[in-house]
């Protein structure tokens, strides 16, 4: 039986990765800092409580279970505006040092183990070029991108010098019913649900004047597992490749929910960036098809029991 270790299994991405692996017949161990599993029935897998910032404890666990695949889905990360300075040491431990522990395990005793590490659109800086692929130069211009790019450099070093099978996915925005509502799509969905139910105060979003490429966290998880099974390790951008203007998205969602539409904010420009998904298609065999409207509808259905009416395809 194939074995896998999922770091950060209580998070959005780690929980979906674990579910995909369980459904595909893996023997899965998931770890997180909390005492119990948050999203997955513990009868379906082995849950271990561990702080991966403790490199020694992580190494001991790796040597005990000897996983065939490692999915490093844990991270110190927050929504837009999150301040990393107070948690810098913790971010280094979780986002960087624990990656080194996994790579050293693979070098010393991991055999044919494979590692996946999710990086971020932020790895390319606040002002990236219009088209982004894994070959786009990385820019460390915030504390979060510094940690993600440092981990990427570690992985590239171990691939070059030790032939480690370690792959990186640069995740664009992705959401689900498991994402907290301080992120845009869950917050927008919460506001719509509150207005439909006419209960409580609808949470407000800061602005609708921006473009974004949103995908489904569950679908990203499926594609990630496929990607790690490629013939050789590599780096790809994981995104739909279809940026959407937030103002237009809000109008369509309000219409589908039977609400008076928000005032449409005309885009101030064309989409500033677009993901190049060519390498993802080649290495994983597909790209995500669920886009922003689909994900928001999923959140509304699962979190609030609200089914949207059929609407025309997003422009």
Image (cartoon, helix red, strand yellow):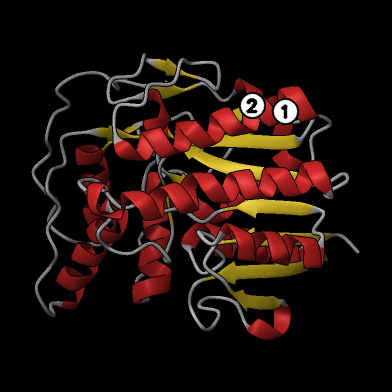
The reply to whether the C-beta atoms of the residues labelled 1 and 2 are less than 8 Å apart is: yes
> Mark number for residue 156?
2
- Which quarter of the image is occupied by the N terminus? bottom right
In the image, 272 versus 75, the foreground residue is 75
Q: Would you place residue 105 above or below residue 137 in this image?
A: below
List the residue tagged with mark 1: 159
Q: Position of residue 8 (x, y in %)?
A: 54, 62
* Residue drawn at the location 52% of the way across and 57% of the way down: 13
* Residue drawn at the location 82% of the way across and 54% of the way down: 68
Q: Position of residue 29 (x, y in %)?
A: 71, 69
308 displayed left or right of 21: left
In the image, 208 versus 227, the foreground residue is 227
* Residue drawn at the location 46% of the way across and 37% of the way down: 148
Residue furthest toward the right?
1
* Residue 114 quadrant: top right
In the image, 256 versus 226, the foreground residue is 226
Q: Residues within 10 Å of mark 1 (few under 14, many from 20)?
A: some
* Residue drawn at the location 65% of the way across and 44% of the way down: 116
Q: Position of residue 164 (x, y in %)?
A: 77, 34
């Amino acid at each position: 039986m194939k074995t896998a270790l999922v770091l950060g299994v209580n998070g959005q991405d780690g929980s979906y990765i674990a579910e995909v692996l369980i459904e595909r017949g893996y023997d899965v161990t998931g770890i997180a800092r909390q005492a119990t599993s948050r999203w997955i029935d513990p009868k379906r897998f082995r849950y271990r409580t561990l702080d991966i910032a403790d490199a020694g404890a992580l190494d001991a666990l790796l040597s005990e279970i000897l996983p065939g695949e490692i999915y490093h889905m844990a991270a110190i990360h927050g929504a837009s505006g999150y301040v990393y300075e107070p948690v810098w040491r913790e971010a280094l431990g979780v986002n960087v040092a624990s990656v080194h522990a996994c790579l050293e395990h693979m070098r010393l005793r991991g055999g044919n183990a494979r590692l996946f590490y999710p990086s971020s659109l932020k790895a390319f800086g606040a002002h990236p070029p219009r088209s982004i692929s894994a070959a786009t130069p990385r820019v460390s211009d915030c504390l979060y991108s510094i940690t993600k790019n440092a981990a990427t450099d570690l992985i590239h070093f171990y691939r070059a010098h030790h032939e480690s099978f370690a792959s990186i996915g640069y995740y664009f925005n992705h959401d689900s019913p498991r994402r907290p509502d301080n992120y845009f799509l869950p917050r927008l969905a919460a506001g719509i649900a509150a207005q439909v139910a006419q209960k409580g105060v609808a949470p407000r979003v800061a602005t609708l004047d921006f473009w974004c490429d949103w995908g489904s966290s569950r679908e990203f998880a499926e594609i990630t597992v496929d990607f790690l099974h490629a013939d050789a390790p590599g780096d790809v951008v994981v995104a739909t490749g279809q940026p959407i203007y937030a103002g237009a998205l809000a109008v369509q969602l309000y219409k589908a929910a039977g609400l008076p539409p928000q005032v449409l904010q005309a885009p101030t420009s064309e989409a500033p960036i677009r993901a190049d998904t060519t390498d993802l298609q080649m290495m994983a065999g597909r790209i995500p098809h669920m886009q922003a409207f689909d994900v928001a509808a999923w959140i509304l259905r699962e979190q609030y029991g609200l089914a949207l009416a059929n609407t025309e395809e997003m422009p």
